[in-house]
């Protein structure tokens, strides 16, 4: 019976889907692959790596590139030697990748691939465009899929599982992983591409469009240097999450068609500058790709002349508009169209403009005034114009009646149904109108579906990407609601009535009554005792739940005066620099003047909030920043304002952006009971929303069962037994990789629940079991970090629990004695080899953990994992396993002896220096060398051998670090303390 492995399952499946089976052994000419007149697979020719005419150090298949240059460029066909001049330019980009960086090299290469570069090949040396690819006629290109593609750069040699070559240029790299090992996932393939291939052989990725990783369950893709957390899936319409080879087959057939790969290269790739002035590459997600192509198809067809794109908050609508504008402007059949981007707020205008400007989109203008907008439209400007709906306010009559004007309206649910929307339509009578929204309104008096939905679209929208899809794909996070009932001696009936009136249907509410209700509500929410209690709860919740993981929060208050009241109260509980008020300072009240900021000043403040190292932790707002504000570091919203309908949903979705591995959900702390109104805001899709907005109480009900599921693995194990014996007994309940991976998956569910609920007192009942399970989890965690989805990093609150409450007995590490005493070997072998193996394995793991980040020990760590796997599969017997372990232990001791004793501590000083360089700013003029020197000296003074494994040792070192940071006025940043302590624990 043959085994399943990555080569004969996933790799072969993808190859056969692309090429229709392995039948091609010689290079075919240009055109899609066909067999018996029908398309073979997706149209790729299969060619084994041995039959691809290139040397291992060559990135391109130069013979095929030369053929394409001659085939696609008449000027080069006339003088074929000109192809060598182009190849020289392409080789120069490859040669410069290590000095210029991969992003810059890929950007320049992309410009060549898109036909944006020229050479003096015309009459009188005039420049003519050089075409490397034919985007209009697919049959003019040469498509090859090859496997085990070896590339060598200097001493580094890497072998990619599958590579897709178009005209000899490697556009896609695919890494396949085995589908039959639980600890291995697509993530491991992505890590291999991102951390290994792109770093060690960047030349291979100079022409890369995107890369793909799959283990036969999920297929994910991402652009060069994109963090793995932003890699995404590719799905078809209404397709369930894959989970098996059938799902992967659908993803391959959608993403890796020649037409789709070239479309993504030509129209769905952006190079942008992030807020840290770094160059990044962005490739569209599948929902953006599908929606943009639906818009383009509708415009090319000429009807219907409108459509609604309903994509959930945070799923990338700003970028969708960039891709749409880019593709519409490049479409020859549209004869140089005008694309108008219309937003309904100044802050959205700033956000959209910055997205477009950061992406270097050509032919972009911004209509800052009504007069400027009218001038641009009357003068028939053929560009991308960004403006707000309000600038149509004075438009009278027709401004431009051209039919190739395409209007993309962002947040199409708010001002589009009124007079401004009517004026805009009258000014542009023949324009196409596409509305984009995350929260459409479905009411008789205001209805987004009626305003933008085409009659031809059966459900009212042309593209939908809902709550469930967004969370399933990892584009956004779940939201946890935590209701807080503020129990005070005030008229609860009055506050309930006022709240109900404020959040009721405005159409039936007299304006005077609304004003009275608002005034009554304002008095009730500002009761001093109530403000004090809420601010105390906010400070406590932020410090206990949000700050430990390095996130930030937003406080939403009833009105501008409330902002000041809450700020004053929070300043008594937190450092003043930890909070800041952001309001539109109106009126003559002098108290608000200090918050009257220019747009540049406000943007600088918000950039400080987005910076993890800045002491600003909480923003206090009332109306600003509830829509359009994007800060992934924001996790918690403290809501003390009655919001309704789409405004409520938009506001709470400020917290749902992804941010690193530790952010698993957004948190809404609700002081007014808005949870039910969330569902009301989306009555037509209540079930979908309720499935992702989970009440924290529901999570508490799951914790007992989650603990029991973990303990099932240790039935019959005495959990009161401590020390070596207790740990070994527990580990024996997890005898092989399959059982360990099953335990890891079960524990991961428990750990996520724990992080979400902590520090709720109800967890105390389960604390002992959780501590015990966490220690077992850490003790069997693979040292080489394989299977990174299951073997996840522990959350900050779990680590804190372990550090504070667990006293680990100091195990006397006699590894060196055991290894070096040759006479001991026979004695060991004559005893119980299985038991002695276990003991030795644990000691090696403990020693390797001390050097986890030191590359010198990486191979030893990988060898240990391989050795354990072979032993568990029965490929080597106990005595041979022990002998191999002894050999590995000798090498470990020898490696430690070769390393200078100060090496780790020097690495520690270097890591600390880098850390403090990052946090240094104008307000903390700290001499970094002095800080590091002071920390280094005091830690050396208080530490002792094995201090990391004792409560007393950790306590003393933490105290010394706090004292040192206090001396330099750096004690108020918890993240800085945590990171510095982490380095000390690792290197000292």
Image: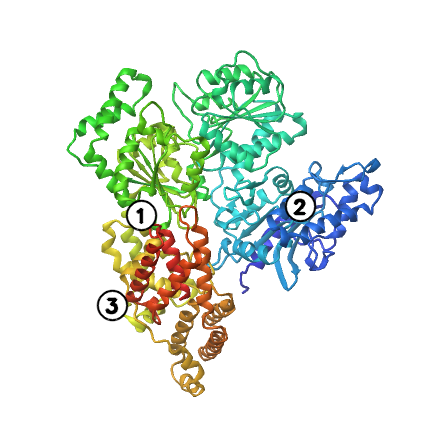
Give the residue at the far bottom of this rendering: 823
Name the side, left or right, on which 741 lies relative to 79: left
Give the residue at the far top of this rendering: 397
Can residue 271 be seen? yes
Q: Name the residue beneath numbered marker 1.
A: 545
Q: Position of residue 416 (x, y in %)?
A: 46, 21
**Which residue is more in the foreground, 198 or 922?**
922
- In this rendering, the answer to whether 921 lies above or below 320 is below
**Which residue is more in the foreground, 754 or 563?**
563
Residue 720 shows which numbered tag? 3
Q: On the rendered image, what quadrant is the N terminus found in? A: bottom right
Name the side, left or right, on which 639 lies relative to 395: left
Per the image, label 1 sits on a secondary structure element best described as: helix
**Which residue is more in the foreground, 818 or 241?**
818
Residue 581 shows which numbered tag? none
Mark 2 Cα shell of 10 Å, populated few (<14), some (14-19), many (≥20): many
Q: Earlier in the sequence, mark 2 or mark 3?
A: 2
């Amino acid at each position: 019976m043959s085994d399943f492995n990555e080569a004969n399952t996933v790799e072969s499946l993808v190859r056969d889907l692309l090429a229709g089976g392995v039948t091609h052994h010689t290079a075919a000419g240009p055109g899609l692959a066909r067999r018996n007149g029908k398309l073979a697979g997706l149209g790729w020719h299969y060619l084994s790596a041995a039959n691809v005419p290139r040397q291992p150090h060559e990135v391109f298949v130069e013979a095929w590139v030369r053929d394409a240059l001659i085939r696609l460029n008449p000027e080069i066909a006339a003088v074929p030697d000109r192809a060598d001049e182009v190849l020289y330019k392409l080789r120069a980009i490859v040669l410069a990748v290590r000095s210029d960086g991969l992003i810059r090299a890929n950007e320049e290469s992309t410009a060549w691939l898109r036909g944006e570069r020229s050479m003096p090949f015309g009459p009188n040396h005039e420049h003519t465009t050089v075409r490397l690819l034919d985007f209009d006629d697919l049959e003019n290109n040469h498509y090859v899929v090859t496997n085990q593609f070896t590339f060598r750069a200097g001493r580094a040699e890497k072998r990619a599982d599958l590579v897709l070559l178009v005209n000899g240029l490697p556009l896609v790299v695919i890494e396949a992983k085995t589908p039959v090992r639980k600890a291995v996932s697509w993530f491991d393939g992505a890590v291999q591409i991102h951390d290994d291939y792109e770093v060690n052989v960047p030349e291979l990725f100079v022409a890369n469009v995107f890369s793909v990783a799959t283990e036969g369950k999920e297929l994910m893709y991402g652009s060069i240097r994109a963090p793995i957390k932003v890699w995404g899936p590719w799905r078809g319409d209404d397709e369930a999450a894959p989970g098996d080879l059938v799902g992967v087959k659908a993803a391959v057939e959608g993403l890796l068609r020649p037409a789709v790969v070239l479309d993504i290269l030509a129209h769905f790739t952006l190079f942008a500058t992030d807020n840290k002035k770094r160059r990044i590459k962005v490739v569209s997600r599948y929902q953006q790709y599908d929606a943009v192509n639906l818009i383009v198809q509708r415009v090319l067809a000429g009807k219907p002349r409108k459509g609604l794109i309903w994509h959930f908050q945070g799923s990338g609508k700003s970028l969708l508009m960039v891709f749409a504008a880019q593709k519409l402007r490049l479409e020859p059949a549209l004869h140089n169209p005008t694309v108008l981007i219309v937003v309904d707020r100044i802050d959205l205008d700033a956000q959209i403009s910055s997205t477009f400007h950061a992406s270097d989109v050509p032919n972009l203008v911004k209509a800052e005034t009504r007069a400027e907008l009218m001038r641009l439209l009357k003068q028939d400007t053929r560009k991308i114009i960004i403006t707000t709906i309000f600038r149509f306010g004075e438009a009278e009559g027709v401004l431009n009646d051209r039919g190739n004007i395409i209007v993309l309206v962002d947040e199409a649910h708010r001002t589009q149904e009124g007079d401004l929307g009517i004026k805009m339509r009258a000014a542009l009578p023949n324009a196409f109108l596409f509305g984009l929204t995350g929260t459409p309104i479905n009411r008789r008096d205001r209805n987004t579906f009626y305003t933008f939905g085409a009659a031809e679209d059966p459900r009212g929208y042309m593209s939908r990407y809902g709550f469930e899809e967004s969370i399933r794909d990892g584009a956004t996070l779940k939201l946890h609601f935590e209701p807080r009932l503020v129990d005070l001696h005030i008229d609860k009936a009055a506050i309930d009535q006022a709240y109900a009136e404020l959040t009721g249907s405005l159409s039936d509410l007299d304006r005077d009554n609304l004003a009275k209700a608002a005034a009554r509500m304002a008095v009730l929410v500002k009761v001093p005792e109530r403000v004090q209690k809420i601010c105390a709860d906010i400070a406590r919740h932020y410090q206990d739940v949000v700050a430990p993981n390095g996130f930030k929060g937003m406080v939403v208050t009833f009105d501008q005066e409330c902002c000041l009241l809450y700020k004053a109260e929070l300043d008594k509980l937190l450092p003043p620099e930890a909070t800041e008020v952001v309001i539109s300072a109106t009126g003559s009240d002098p108290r608000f003047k200090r918050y009257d900021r220019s747009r540049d000043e406000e943007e600088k403040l918000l950039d400080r909030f987005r910076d993890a190292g800045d002491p600003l932790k909480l923003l206090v707002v009332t109306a600003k920043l509830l829509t359009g504000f994007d800060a992934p570091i924001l996790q918690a919203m403290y809501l003390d304002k009655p919001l309704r309908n789409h405004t409520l949903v938009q506001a709470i979705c400020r917290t749902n952006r992804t941010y690193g591995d530790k952010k698993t959900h957004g948190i809404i702390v609700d002081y007014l009971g808005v949870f039910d109104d969330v569902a009301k805001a989306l009555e037509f899709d209540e079930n979908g929303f309720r499935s992702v907005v989970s009440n924290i109480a529901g999570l508490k009900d799951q914790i007992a069962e989650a603990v029991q599921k973990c303990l099932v693995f240790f039935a019959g194990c005495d959990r009161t037994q401590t020390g070596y014996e207790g740990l070994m007994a527990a580990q024996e309940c997890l005898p092989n990789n399959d059982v360990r991976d099953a335990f890891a998956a079960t524990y991961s569910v428990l750990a996520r629940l724990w992080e979400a609920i902590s520090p709720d007192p109800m967890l105390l009942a389960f604390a002992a079991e959780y501590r015990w399970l966490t220690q077992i989890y850490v003790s069997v965690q693979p040292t080489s970090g394989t299977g990174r989805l299951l073997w996840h990093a522990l959350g900050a609150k779990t680590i804190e629990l372990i550090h504070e409450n667990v006293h680990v007995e100091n195990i006397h590490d006699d590894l060196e004695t055991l290894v070096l005493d040759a006479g001991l070997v026979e004695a060991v072998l004559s005893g119980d080899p299985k038991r002695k193996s276990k003991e030795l394995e644990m000691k090696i793991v403990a020693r390797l953990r001390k050097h986890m980040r030191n590359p010198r020990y990486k191979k030893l760590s990988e060898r240990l994992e391989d050795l354990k796997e072979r032993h568990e599969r029965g490929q080597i017997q106990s005595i041979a396993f022990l002998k191999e372990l002894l050999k590995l232990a000798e090498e470990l001791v020898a490696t430690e002896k070769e390393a200078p004793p100060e090496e780790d501590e020097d690495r520690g000083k270097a890591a600390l220096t880098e850390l403090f360089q990052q946090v240094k700013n104008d307000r903390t003029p700290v001499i970094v060398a002095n800080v590091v020197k002071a920390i280094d000296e005091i830690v050396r003074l208080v530490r002792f051998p094995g201090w990391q494994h004792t409560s007393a040792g950790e306590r003393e070192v933490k105290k010394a670090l706090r004292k040192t940071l206090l001396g330099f006025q750096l004690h108020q940043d918890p993240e800085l303390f945590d990171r510095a302590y982490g380095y000390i624990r690792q290197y000292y």
